[in-house]
Amino acid sequence: MSNVGVKMRNFVNVVTEHYMEGLCSLSRIKVSDLFYGSTQEAEQEAKNRMAADPCTKKMTLSPLPNPRIQFNTSRPADGSMDFLPFYGGNDDDGNKILCVDAAGRAVLYDAGSAATVETLPSLHKPKASGPVALSVARPGGAHDPARPDALYVLDRIRGSFEALVYGDPTPPSPYQYRLARCADMFVWHWLRLPPPPYATGPRTVRSYALLDGDTICVSSGAEDRFGTYFFNTATEQWTKAGSWILPFYGRAYAVPELDNLCFGIQDIRPHHLCALDLSSSMDGGGGAPTPRLRHHWPDMDKPRGWRLQNVSMAYMGAGRFCIAKTFDVATVLNGVEVVRENGGTTSKSKLRMIRHKSLRYGLVKDAIRCVL
């Protein structure tokens, strides 16, 4: 399948945190600041960079856009805020973001033209910093077409698992519905979900992804125990894929228009963009073989002496990714695109990566935590 006609987001959401105060901010960068107008323009600019004199290349630091919204926890010692993407359904431009503090209190921020904040009920159990968060279309549709998705939130360490859904938290009998129940009974609420099978003790989720639009995939391991598990959001059942872990750092993205391969940042040095095929692992049974990497691309040329401290990635649509890498010197945002060689449109066409633009931020009091 080609990327042509696939919609691309207009903004990249950037989460920053103040080193001392625990103040978290959300800024938005235009996608046009990271990507050229076309693949051909990006390829031509890459040729120009190759031909340029290395002595003329200078590192230019970019100013981060002013925050769209800021949050501060009342007790910084308890932990900072987490910003969780709640994209999908009618929000395909990355506007809706769930903000959760260390106590489990939550608000839903819509960064669209209205820029609204909606208070939500607290989670049943607070989650450790940096939980797994995936937006999934609810089976059979939703009670409200404007709120078609659920946000699944999993504690990376303790395994506590919940979903934010819109509907009636105490469903009545069909007879009561026929009498008087109506849409004004619908509210946002949290559903408790079964913890993953590995959650019999402390286990850390190493990487995760959403497959086929409704299957959550998580890889967890501690010391001598490793495993990858699937959660079916329709049946609310966990199954084990195999005793191996995904080779990604944090979140990965299954991209239907690119052979439904799973793309992420490799969890070993030099932490490049990579892709693998998980389709053969979804049959269940727990004995699926370890999937092999199908592709591996250097998404940036790391300056000598720079030490990597953190990395995150967001999918922009149309085969384009924003990759954020934080070093001890600066944070670099790279726009890259994956396309088929020679304009191919079938799965038999090989894939290649094209670099677009880069932005570098030398923040002093703040750190870029992630891109969403």
Image (cartoon, grey):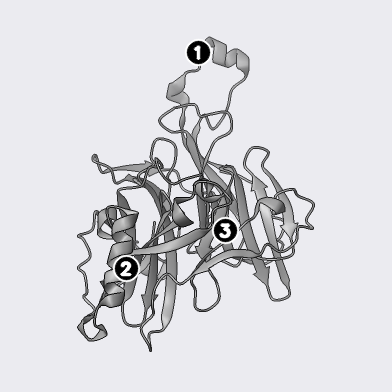
Disc 3 residue type (three-letter) = Tyr
CA gap, disc 1 and disc 2? 64 Å
Front in this rendered view, residue 345 or 295: 345
Which residue is outermost to the front? 342
Residue 6: in sight, yes or no?
yes
Q: Give the spatial CA distance, label 3 vs label 2.
A: 32 Å
Mark toward the start of the polypeptide (3 vs 2): 2
Residue placed most toward the observer, 369 or 251: 251
The mark closer to the camera, 3 or 1, is 3
Task: Name the secondary structure under disc 3.
Answer: strand
Q: Residue at x 75, y 61 (%)?
A: 289
* Disc 3 + disc 2, Cβ < 8 Å: no
Give left or right: position of 241 versus 108.
right
Q: Judge the density around disc 1: few (<14), some (14-19), many (≥20) Cα neighbours within 10 Å.
A: few
Who's the residue at 21% across and 69% down the image?
Answer: 62
Mark 1 or mark 2, which is nearer to you?
2
| Residue on which the image places disc 3 | 208
Q: Position of residue 125 (x, y in %)?
A: 54, 53
- Between label 3 and label 2, give the one nearer the viewer: 2
- Between disc 3 and disc 1, whose residue precedes? 1
Considering only order in the chain, which callout, 2 or 1, is on the residue closer to the N terminus?
A: 2
Q: In the rendered image, which residue does mark 1 sit on?
A: 180
Cα distance between the residues tagged 3 and 1: 42 Å
Amino acid tagged 1: Ala
Residue bearing mark 2: 46
